[in-house]
Amino acid sequence: MRRRLSILTVACLLGVAVAHAAPPDVVRIGVLNDMNGPFADQSGRGSVVAAQMAAEEFAGQSGGLTVQILSADHQNKPDVGAQIAREWVDRQGVSAIADAVNSAVGLAVNQVMADRHRTFIATNVGTSDLTGKFCQPTTVQWTMDTYALANTIVRATIPQGGDSWYFISFDYALGAALERDATAAIASLHGKVVGSIKHPIGTTDFSSYLLRAQSSGARVVALADTGTDLTNVVKQAAEFGVVKKQMLAGLFTQIVDVDAIGLQAAQGMLVTEAFYWDLNDATRAFARRFAQRFNNRVPTANQAGVYSSVLAYLNAVKAAGTIEGEKVVAQMESAPIQDALFGTVTVRKDGRAVHDMYTFKVKAPAESKSRWDVYQRIATTPGAQAFRPLDQGGCKLVRP
């Protein structure tokens, strides 16, 4: 056993020279995300459970491949994430890394995996630059990105009279990308942005930000943040009565955020998601299985994305007969993927996985039948309309 592990480690260190070899008997996938910080509920340990579920489902058709799932906390630090990625690939024989959840960390890991010709399943990296100017032939961005989140909710909101916007945004890569992509969508639909303000991650007092948003006269107050910061700002927005006079749009909101906020404060808020557990029979069945293994909690879009993308990756490894990142991603691009949770998924040349996106309105307490019954669907945006056109991202892999 020691000799086998030693051979595998040496092979990984050889990089390009072994990239064309058949996959080892054991395929190792690392789930790298925020386990204890502001994004832990969205991804965290639930993403590890989702990856394990995908590995177990794949086992019945693996053709002899054994899958091992590793996990680590990058602490939302790009240097820590990059170091873990290097350690995993170079010393532990990891063939793919999934999740990432933080945009800055994701961009760092993106380069590490490309240099080593291994696959980055960037399931929950938000920045659309990942499949734009930083695209790599070894990366697939699965669940969502800032363009799709922003574009989808703008398309659903402007027809309802939300033609003027004010942004309260994270002062880091994710917030900047969300605001940029939403602004472009607003302009394309003849709306306008009347102002914006940025806040550092970990802000607890949003009173001054909300007062500026209210005084702006904007019909939509857009929140370009997520996690605990989003929870704090929505709770305070309810105290300020924002929803009574303006639309409140969470550009990057997930079901655990709504649960943490509570329907009393979150009711009426508009959100965009790539997945909701109560969409159809398949999503409900997956949610039941997930809840049995994860504290009776339904899966977030992030966690559902990890399940689907890891399963798609494993099927591609089997079909391609290699763990070389470029060939595995090319296999994923070769034909539409029929996924139980996201429907038909098409992986484009820039690495963007395209599927339908949804806009929901958060229910009032009286409308909800259970803890996780929180959304009313108001619009479905086809993937071709939700995601950035292939020729507009600046990806070097896309021919003019």
Image (spheres, grey):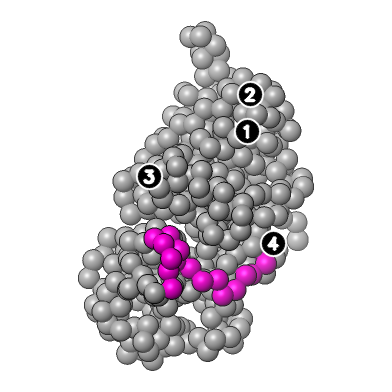
Q: Secondary structure at mark 4?
A: helix
Name which residue lies at 45% across and 42% down.
292
- Look at the numbered disc 3 and give the secondary structure of its residue: loop
Kindly indicate the quadrant of the structure image that contains residue 58: top right
Residue at mark 3 to residue at mark 1: CA–CA distance: 24 Å
N-terminal of the pair, mark 2 or mark 1, is: 1
The residue at which mark 1 appears reads as 58
75 sits to left or right of 247: left
**Numbered mark located on residue 65 in the image:** 2
Residue 72 located within the stretch drawn in magenta = no
Rounded to the nearest angstrom, the CA distance separating label 2 from label 1 is 9 Å
Q: Earlier in the sequence, mark 1 or mark 4?
A: 1
Residue 48 shown left or right of residue 26 in the figure: left
Residue under label 4: 390
Badge 1 amino acid? Phe
Q: Is residue 38 above or below residue 314?
A: below
Note whether 341 is above or below 263 in the view shown.
above
Question: Does the image show residue 395?
Answer: no
The alpha-carbon separation of the residues under discs 2 and 4 comes to 34 Å
- Circles 3 and 1 in contact, beta carbons < 8 Å: no
Give, as a three-letter code, the residue at label 3. Asn
| Disc 2 element | loop
